[in-house]
Each structure stands twice: as C-alpha cells, then as structure tokens.
Amino acid sequence: MLSTRVRIELVAATLILVGVGLMVYKVFFLGFPLLPGEYRDVWTIESKISFRPGDGPVEADLTLPSELAGWVVLDEHFASSGFGFTVTQDETRRATWTRSELAEPATLYYKLQAYRQNPRELEQRDVPALAVPLLTADQRAAMLRLIEVLEAKSSDRTSFTQLLIRALDSRTTDPDGRFLLSTWDEDSGDVLLLTLALAEIPATALRGVRLEDGRRRQTLSTLLEIHDGERWQVFDPRTGQAGLPEDFFIWQRSEDAVLNVSGARNSRLEFALVSNSLPSRSVLAMEQRSGRYALLDFSIYALPVEQQGVFKGLLLIPVAALVVVIMRLLVGVKTSGTFMPILIAIAFIQTTLLLGLAIFLGLVAAGLWIRGWLSHMNLLLVSRISAVVIVVIFLMSALALTSYRLGLDQVLSVTFFPVIILAWTIERMSILWEEEGPHEVLVQGSGSLLVATLAYLAMSNRLASHLTFNFPELTLTLLGLILLLGKYTGYRLTELYRFRAMGDKP
C-alpha cells in the first residue's frame, strides 16, 4: 500500500508530464507558437486558367495541390461563374469546371492560402515500376553512350544524376548531350526522365510554384525526384543541387499533366503570388476553422471570441494561486486569507498596479475607521457585516462620483474591486486589530499586498498570458506543482532568517 506522500508525488508527476507533454506536442507537431509575437509567412497563391472557345462542351480539369513537405493549406476558394463545378478525390484531388458551350474567352480561378508549418523532407513512397522509354534508334544509341560514360564517372545514383544534369545542360560540350537536346522538341526535363528510365533509375517530375512575393503570371516549375535505392531525393534540373528549395510550393508529385482542357483552345495556367506575415495565433485560428486538427477542436480557439476573452483571464488564476502557495509555504509571508491576494491581483489588472494600490489602501483605511465606530454599537455579526458591505459600496460610489467630477476617469476603475472581498477584508482586519493589535494588522495587510503585487506581476507577464492561453493543459502542470508544495514540511525562508542565530553557535 502506497503512502499518501508517494501517491501525491505520483499524481503530481503524472499531471506535470501530461501538461508538459501536451504542450510539447502542440509546439512541435501542431505548430503552436511557444513564444508571444511569433509570425508566420502565409502565401496566397492564385491560379488562373484561361482559354478560348472551341467546339462542343468545355471541360477544364485542374490538379489541386497536396500538403507535402510540411506545407499546410489554410483556405481555398474557387471562382467558376457560369460553369458547373465539382471536386473529386481519388489518388489526387482534382477540380473540374464544365459547360455545355462557350461563346467567349473564359477565365477560371482557384486561390489558396498556405504556410510551411514544419519544414521537412518529402514523404517517402513506393517505387513505381520502370517504363521502357520510346526512342528512335539514334536517340537510344546516344543515350546508351552517355549512360555508359556517366556510370564510369559516378559512384552511385546520386552522383550519376548530378553528372547527367550537367551533361544535358544547354551549355554542355558533351556531344551526346548536345545531340539529345537538339533532337528534342521539349525541355530538357523530359530528356532527363527518359535517360534516367533507360539507366533503370526510378525518377519522376515534381511540379510546383517558386515563391516570390508580388510575382504575377508565374508558370509551374519542375524539379527532378529520383530514388537512390534507399530513399527519394530531389534535384534542381537547372543546377543539379540536391534538396527541396525552401521557396518551392509543391503542386503535383507526378509526371501527369496538371491541367487538362477539352472543348477549348489556347489554354493557359498562370499563378499570382502574395506573401503576408500573420501572427501565429491568427494562423492557428484559421487552421481551427478548417477543422484540421481534432485536438484544436477541444482548445480555447474552438470557443466564440467573447468566451475566449473570459478564459484568457480565468486561465491566469492558477498562476496567481501558485504565487500565493510559494509565498506562504516556502517564504512564510502571512496574508489575510488565501484567496484575497488573488482577487486583489485580478483587480490590479483592471486598475493598473499603482492606482489599484492607492484605491485599495484608501478604501480599507476608511472602512476600518467606520468599522471601528460600528463596533461600539454592539451589533450582531450578520448585521455588522451587512453594514460594512453597504458602507463599502457607498465609499466606492462616492469615490467614483468625486473622481468623475474632478475629471479623474482612471479612478472610475474602482468598480473592478470585489465588494464582498473588500467588506470581508475590512471586517477580518478589524477583528484582528481587536484581538492581536495593530502590528498584526500591519503584518498581514502588507503581506497580502506584497503577494497580490507579485501575483499581479506574474499574471500580467506577457509570456505567462501567452502560455496559459495557448497551452491551457499547463494548468495540470501548475496543479501538480501545487500538490507537491502541499506536502512540503520543511522550514520557510522567514523561519530560517528568524532562527539564523542558532546556526552561528558551535
């Protein structure tokens, strides 16, 4: 049977680990900002499909991008005035616009917003079966000679691919490379793919958009992806540089056509790009609206904005509670009650610290004076406390009216102080004055204000506000720490100072 202390320690350790673990998961896998003030570069990519009328029904079929290499699509919009529109999902997601007939040139739009959450390499996938390239006899002979030369110079598929890219560069001096480029009507990307296929190296095209803020009429770019025997690797077919560029948004990971248009002519696909730096919280809210993560659906972001503001304040109370526990159990500061410093700290957030201190001291001093007068009336407890409550309300009203007449609008924030707590504080300090004397009132009153001030500083800290709102699971961690502190039985700092002379004796 475990002792109470061990059970508390196990429960506290579990709470702390759960809270910190959920926070780490949200930071590294969901992209929550760990620090306040973080921004994300959100790209707005607008694709424009334009074509002229042809014969018969028109159908435009566009491949929609997938979320690869850490990219996250936040929002999508389609514009298809006068066209039928559907989105289908099989191996790839495609948008299809249809119309029975077309009399004038038409333009279709697809716009998305995306950002790169956690930059990472492309996901590995199965290696497709190699297809035998269709070549003429002289093209095949030139390719085989080129492959033989490059295989002799290379050590693996990676170095072979980089040498092949150089050999098929437009500035190449290799005779077979120049011959192949001259006999091909299309760009060198297809020559690369066909040569790699003949060399029995699995390869495919990686189509996407090179990101450049403000760029218009951008067309798709192509990268080369090969399987080196163990994993897929990306190469820039212009430079031979390995790796996926950071400014490359992947649109399609295959050699298929991105756009197919039938029943029209002169079809064209262009892109316009705009980059916008948004606060991470706004980006996360956009992700939540898209229903992307189940965990986000249970977060504060799932609440209406008004309720989010309420919880933003409530989630700071555990921070103030931890401050009170530390100051009372470890430091040994006496306070008037356990929750009064927390409530005063909450009022300070509304009034600001110095003004709140002045208002609080003024109200308590006036209340103690009136409470002293009431004590001579020999009233019952309930009547006396009720009278104190009414007196406190009267004092707050008088203070608010006077400050308003004098043009001191900031003093109107006196209404943020909890009336009942102020009344009870006055009653408690008055009783303490009668039983223990003014010294004890001064000790507990100043201790309460000290703890309330520290709690206010902790609650108004920007990092604390950011962490508690974005990671409410840290409340479990604070609970675990408070449970551990609840089993502390050692000396407090004030006791160590009080008995310091004992340590000097031999």
Image (cartoon, grey):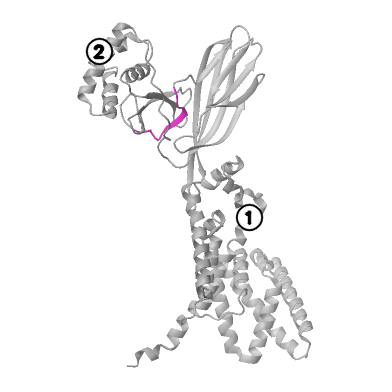
Task: Examine the rendered structure and indicate whether residue 179 appears above or below residue 329.
Answer: above
Task: Examine the rendered structure and indicate whether residue 213 appears above or below residue 306.
Answer: above
- Please tell me whether mark 2 sits on a helix, a strand or a loop: helix
Label 1 belongs to which residue? 309
How far from the left and from the top, in percent, is residue 401? 73, 68
Q: Is residue 247 highlighted in magenta?
A: yes
Q: If the image is split into quadrants, where does the C terminus sit?
A: bottom left
| Front residue (pair 163, 360) | 163
How far from the left and from the top, in percent, is residue 46? 53, 27
- Which kind of residue does numbered mark 2 sit on? Asp
| Front residue (pair 305, 14) | 14
- Gap between marks 1 and 2 measured at Cα: 69 Å
- Please tell me whether mark 1 sits on a helix, a strand or a loop: helix
Earlier residue among tags 1 and 2? 2
Task: Examine the rendered structure and indicate whether residue 227 appears above or below residue 379.
Answer: above
Give the magenta part as a residue range. Answer: 243-254
| Front residue (pair 405, 190) | 190
Label 2 belongs to which residue? 176
How far from the left and from the top, in percent, is residue 277? 49, 41
